[in-house]
Amino acid sequence: MAIYHEDEALGKAYDQKLMRRLLKYARPYRSLLAVCIVLLLVITGLDLLQPYLIKVAIDNHMNALTEPMLAFVPGNEPRPGISFDEYVFVREKEIKRDPAPDSGWAGRPIPARIEQNEDAYYLLMQFPGGDITRRELTPTELCIFKEYDTHAVIRLSLILLGALSLAFLLNYIEVYILQYTGLKIVSSMRLDVFQHLQRLSLSFFDKNPTGRLVTRVTNDMDALNEMYTAVLVNLFKDVFLLVGIIIVMLKMNVELALVSFAVLPVIVCVAAVFRKKARDAYRAVRVRLARINAAMAENISGMRIIQIFGREAKKFREFDEINRDYFHAGMQELKVHAIFRPAMDLISSLALALLLWFGGRRVMWGTLEFGMLFAFTNYLQQFFRPINDLTEKYNIMQSAMASAERIFLLLDADEVEPDPVEPVIIPRLKGEIEFQNVWFTYNGEDWVLKDVSFRIEPGETCAFVGATGAGKTSIISLIGRMYEISHGKILIDGVDIRNIPRHELRRHIGVVHQDVFLFTGDIKSNIRLGDLGITDEQVREAACFVNADKFIRELPGEYDAKVKERGATLSSGERQLLAFARALARDPAILVLDEATAHIDTETEALIQDGLAKLVRGRTTLVVAHRLSTIQNADKIIVIHKGRVREIGTHQELLARRGIYYQLYLLQYKEQMGVS
Amino acid sequence: MRQRLQVLDDFFLQYRYRYVIGVIILIVVDALQLVVPRLLGNMTDAFREGALTKQGLLHYIFIIIGVALLVAVGRYFWRIYILGTARLLDYNLRNKFFAHLETLSADFFNRHKTGELMAHATNDIHAVRHAFGSGVTLMVDAVFLSIATVSIMLTTIDTRLVLLGLLPLPFLTLVVIGFSKVIHSRFLKVQEAFAGLTDFVQENLSGIRVVKSFVQEETELARFRQSNEKLVSSNMHLVRIWGLFGPLVQYLAGLSFVIVLGYGGKLVILGDVSLGDFVAFTGYLGMATWPMMAIGWVVNTIQRGMASMDRLNLIFQVKPKITDHEDTVDIPGIEGQIEFRNLTFKYPDAASPALCGITLTIPKGMTLGILGRTGSGKSTLTDLLLRVYDPSPGELWIDGIDITKLPLATLRRDIGYVPQDSFLFSTSIGRNIAFAGDEFSREEVEQAAELAGVRDDIQEFPDGFDTLIGERGVTLSGGQKQRVAIARALIKDPRILILDDCFSAVDTGTEEKILRSLRGIRRGRTTILISHRISTLKEADEIIVLDEGRIIEMGNHESLVAAGGLYAEIHEGQLLEAELNSDKET
């Protein structure tokens, strides 16, 4: 299984070359991404505000009644304070600068503070000259002081509410923009890949299984989407948060900050070990899951053989082994996470203990405020979150890089169909076809066509006859230049087809394949096939002309009837008729028919024969022939045997020769002749 | 609920104590975690009162470290006990699923596609595991932590503050429940769009030949763009609500803090609440947001797990159609005499019978040839002989016993079968040949390979008989695969050997050689050769020609050629073909 191999090949999580190519796709969106980053900066700031606000609330208000104050004469206070008696009291710590300059005693602030003794509160004021007044505050008076703080705290909570609301709004906008750009980037990449696929030559598709290519356009792209949206900008978020916390902590208190960072090396080490272990475990789980899927798929498709050979027990043992392997790998992954996550929490608790020990003593000594310590315990918790996040992004990065590598490998596939340097445009093709000593191989080893030469005049009907694998279908593919020939020349109206632009060439060739391929859509669109120059009227005319109109009119919705499951609801005869209409609508000079071998009921068969006769008129027609009637009516029969042209002539001529054609005729057509 | 989990009854019986232990540890861990905020609160008050000594501080710190250690150890163990047991459940359930599949008959596998069954084995089993892993954890957390935090807060901290502070949290639960529903349904839409895109690309790439010959690249690109756009827009539809979820949760949790800061701060200043209680409360609040969200998630996780369990149960409830019954005759083995008595057989869901009025006796030791076009009923005969499908009672007899009364294992043990598609497993070639039993020696394997004419081929591979088949080893040619499949049947030296059209990719020379050695070893044993090639059959003791489910001709090669029927006609055609193919290039 392809998936099996791909999952085993989990590479590195970061590859500069790949990254550079990936970022190229992000370029058109760089302004939106810049907006995201600015938003993230603001959001990070808002996130960091919360512990700070609580710190201010605790230190300046909740725990501040007994803090030293300065009493100002009203009008002199540097900032709003508490009006009491004839003074305005302002807490010392709330004044950033030095108290107001010395301007006479009336202007000079008076140091004051509130003292608590049992249940009584006293206001102490120290006047210049050393006089100290001490008066007891009544509960109502005390309330004036407390009211100042309660108002402040409510104000702070309103600021917090504002910050939260703003963060909420910005967060949503950021997520929205980010997801939008991520999806856009990936969808443009996906478009590129699909466009590239459309330009690759058929030989590429012969070599690469469809399923694998589909995965490139779908699942691999999804992994990239996850990388763009979940990792790339959240990476910024985490880094911003981390840097922000570090800065805030350092600014608030260098010592405490350094104490908090003391665990950082431990975290980095643990995270590094975890990263490796988690990656190994994750890989093991993925590989084993793929193995389970492969075993499941194989055993279900081989169930018949297992049961017939009575090997249920043995196969169960094998499956059990694989399943148990998966279980053990899962347990291993579980253990890695079960150790790492609690370990991270433990480290954060140790950091907390360290902080409390270091800061707690300073609080006791009075050199540190309690609110500051409390804020640090909050920041410490925030500090661990981005670190945890960062380690979790690793797996996503890894699978995204693997996907990117596969996608770029596909984009680098250069088996693009080449177009001529000096194109020759033939406005109206006559339809003369000539093969000159054509040699052709699909794989570079086995010759499918060997030195094939023939000439078909304009308007002629030419039947190709031969056993399965003789090379008939290859000849037909080569006329539309689906593959490149190795030697020789193919000429249409005397021009080497390599000099005709591919699309021009193919527009002149109408193809009716044996298994008619219908696209999802409606009947109309399947006849028109994207050529908007074909009107509804012309679609109808074409269908009428080849006898397809009758059955189409019986469908629900007629020409607008939906084609489901690639036309599975239509009979093979009906699909044939549709294909005729499709070919006719484009009025090609050359018609290529890969005749169906399937049994078709006689009524439809008659319609097909009649439609075909009309279609062929006035066109050069090449048929891979299975029906005797087609062969008998052909102007020319070319007998292909083992990659060579062995006989050319009319039916009667070739029969008379008693060669290969005669034998084939006896083998394949005698039965039909008996019927006709 | 009990009925729903019936399949897992024995599992829960055996392992329920693990869950009990895990849940107990989880609750202990949760309880321990509750200590820390209180501790910090007490410390705060001690600070404020200046009552804290260095000793006291150390005391607090040691408790914090001790609790942290216990919590870390506990967390490891509840993960192992709860999540680990859920993984064990995953393993157990998948084994049961596989074992159950093994009992089901061909009929079942025709109705259920491989992809569908595999989706059950992975996605559904994972969903059940999540319900019993993280689902259980979430449930315990949700119930215990929410009750515990709220009651601790209510008993130790000012009631007004607690009630007001907790006010936004129930909305959190509602948001989680409501959002996960909407998110899930929109996510399904995204998956639908993704599947649509996948289908489109699949269609385009498998029809690339048509796309190119009709110059449809541009049209297809335009259609792809549409599909691609639809994926983007359905994703954006999801993002609109999903992107709201995270910030909204953060916002609601934040609202609690706004209340605590404003109202709680006021109470602290007024002296109604101590600063320590305030600190403890912020800690508890941080803890309470998680279980409130967990309640929302647990509802969805368990709902999804149960829906998956229901889907699995639909499969588990399918009863094996072909088994031994009470009236099964106990016999040590079969001899090889086969008798069809006016057998008519119709596949389930088929409109017309595949076999009609077959009456035929194959004595023990006879080699029977069966000729017929595709769909003439050849393979149906083998399906019935191997009891892949059961015929109506009384229509097919082996050794004079109705086949439906033969023990299934004995019957299949004594029949050797080479399938048309020569299905091989992706193990080594040797193990494929020895597939039928556990104790075949290397000599036996090599001998069987020799008889099947594939020994020389195998010995040319890099690892000989140990060469792996498939992507990780060699790719066998069609003929080699067929011959390995023949060796796999021959190694059993079975009483009845059925070769179902298994020479189609083997060249005529090799085929003749194999048939010759078969004639030697199959003397006295029943052999059935099915083919559309006369050369395979012409030496058979008796040949029947099947057409549209009926025997239309019967006899040996000479008599059939002389009769001038379908057999003779096919014979003539194949002679011509042989002549044409031997025609040398000039």
Image: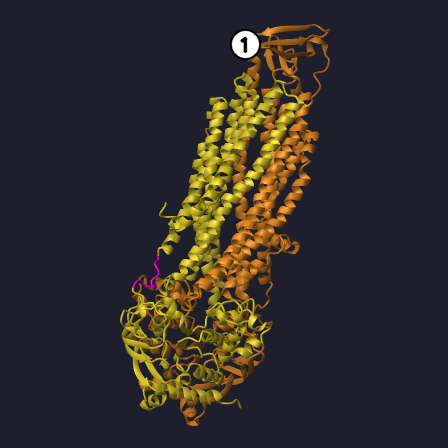
Q: How is the image coloured?
A: by chain
Query: Residue at the location (37% across, 52% down)?
Result: B313
Whole-percent x and y of residue A600?
33, 75
Instruction: Say which colour chain B has.
Output: yellow
State yes or no: residue B1 in magenta.
no
Whole-percent x and y of residue B209?
48, 70
Residue A372 appears in the picture as rendered: no
Q: Quadrant of residue A521?
A: bottom left
**In the figure, B334 relative to A160: above or below?**
below
Mark 1 residue type: Pro
Q: Is residue A553 left or right of residue B123?
A: left
**In the figure, B133 relative to A118: above or below?**
below
State yes or no: residue B321 in magenta.
yes
Residue range highlighted in magenta? B318-326
Whole-percent x and y of residue A26?
59, 51
Of residues B32 and B480, the one nearer the viewer is B32
Q: Is residue A591 left or right of residue A419?
A: left
Of residues B16 and B418, the one nearer the viewer is B16
Reading the image, the residue beneath label 1 is A139
Whole-percent x and y of residue A156?
56, 25
Question: What is the quadrant of the N terminus of chain B in the image?
Answer: top left
Query: Residue at the location (50% across, 86% down)?
Result: A645
Residue A360 appears in the picture as rendered: yes
Chain hosting mark 1: A
Chain that appears orange:
A
